[in-house]
């Protein structure tokens, strides 16, 4: 018991030392990332074993490009935790028939709330200034969605009583959207792709004060469209110049945002790298297409270094683009513990 209490005390001291939300440049990010790597390499049993399989000397890691990224599939097969604290919430991926869901065990919901609030406000300003309209039927119809948790928090922070979730009541949503926009209210409309398409097929809009954000995915409800085609239809239907997008997932506590053209930007505590699709430990230079690796410093209690199944490319200013997904289920070169 004394040892456990000591571990919690050490973790608390470490968290106070790691100031994630006050990063001013890439040098500070690099320092924090390396500190978190050293901490998780010792305290995250799954990540520690993964590094052991790769014969990684953790003391030899001197820059983020040298850090091995944990394949995202481990969130389906293992309990990925760096903290001994009590788990407050388990977020679940949507999953499909026959596929196991990813599970993100969150020991500090306050960290998640601070991350998504400051992340949104970094790009869009105070959430309290918006009316938040959410059209997320596929997420509302299941339990454990981290996106629903985030948007519900946004709705609570909004000062407009018309903020809320809209499931099948598209008529009410359309009426509120038109009325609020005409009153020059700032509106944040976030929706899953197929539901936004349903909305613009039934109603036509000419919005001037609304951020329209799609979260991606047809969830089996419609034929998949390439991003350019989807955004063109939605842009015309809502009468807006650009369709915004969110890049987030169950396994992350932070989100990147695109204000148009599919180019995403990260908050200061998040970074995207791309890896060679044939050699997962090789990081590519900017502009080359590869597997997306995410450094999310908010994943302090789970794993901050994740190799996703998305394909993309990064740009010199830190922005990135998502090009698609891997066809195979395992990330080649990094599935040692999954065999």
Image: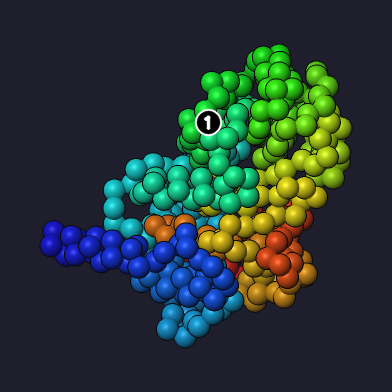
Label 1 SS: loop
Compared with residue 282, is residue 102 higher up or lower down, i.e. above or below? Answer: above
The residue lying furthest to the front in this view is 184
Q: Residue at x 54, y 21 (%)?
A: 161
Q: Residue at x 66, y 62 (%)?
A: 292
Based on the displayed image, in which of its 4 quarters is residue 300 positioned? bottom left
Compared with residue 337, is residue 109 higher up or lower down, i.e. above or below? Answer: above
Q: How is the image coloured?
A: rainbow
Q: Quadrant of the N terminus?
A: bottom left
From the viewer's perspective, is 116 left or right of 44?
right
Q: Residue at x 33, y 46 (%)?
A: 87
Residue 107 appears in the rendering: yes
Compared with residue 18, is residue 94 higher up or lower down, i.e. above or below? Answer: above
| Frontmost residue, 171 versus 87 | 171
Label 1: few (<14), some or many (≥20) within 10 Å? some
Which residue has dot 1 on it? 158
| Frontmost residue, 184 versus 73 | 184
């Amino acid at each position: 018991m004394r040892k456990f209490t000591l571990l919690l005390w050490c973790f608390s001291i470490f968290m106070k030392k790691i100031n994630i939300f006050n990063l001013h440049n890439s040098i500070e990010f690099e320092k924090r990332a390396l500190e978190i790597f050293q901490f998780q390499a010792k305290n995250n049993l799954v990540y520690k074993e993964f590094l052991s399989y790769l014969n990684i000397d953790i003391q030899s890691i001197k820059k983020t490009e040298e850090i091995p990224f944990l394949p995202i599939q481990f969130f389906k097969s293992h309990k990925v935790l760096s903290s001994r604290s009590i788990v407050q919430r388990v977020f679940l991926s949507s999953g499909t028939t026959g596929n196991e869901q990813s599970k993100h065990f969150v020991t500090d919901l306050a960290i998640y709330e601070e991350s998504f609030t400051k992340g949104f406000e970094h790009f869009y300003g105070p959430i309290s200034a918006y009316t938040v309209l959410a059209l997320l039927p596929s997420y509302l119809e299941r339990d454990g969605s981290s996106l629903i948790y985030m948007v519900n928090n946004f709705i609570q922070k909004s000062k407009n009583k018309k903020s809320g979730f809209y499931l099948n009541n598209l008529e009410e949503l359309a009426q509120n959207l038109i009325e609020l926009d005409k009153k020059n209210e700032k509106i944040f409309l976030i929706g899953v792709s197929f539901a936004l398409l349903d909305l613009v097929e039934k109603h036509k809009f000419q919005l001037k004060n609304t951020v329209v954000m799609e979260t991606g995915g047809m969830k089996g409800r419609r034929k998949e469209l390439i991003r350019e085609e989807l955004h063109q239809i939605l842009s015309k239907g809502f009468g807006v110049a650009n369709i915004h997008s969110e890049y987030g997932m169950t396994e992350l506590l932070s989100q990147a945002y695109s204000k148009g053209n599919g180019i995403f930007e990260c908050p200061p505590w998040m970074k995207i790298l791309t890896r060679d699709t044939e050699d997962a430990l090789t990081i590519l230079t900017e502009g080359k297409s590869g597997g997306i690796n995410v450094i999310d410093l908010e994943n302090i209690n789970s794993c901050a270094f994740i190799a996703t199944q998305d394909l993309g490319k990064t740009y010199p200013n830190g922005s990135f683009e998502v090009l698609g997904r891997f066809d195979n289920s395992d990330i080649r070169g990094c599935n040692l513990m999954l065999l």
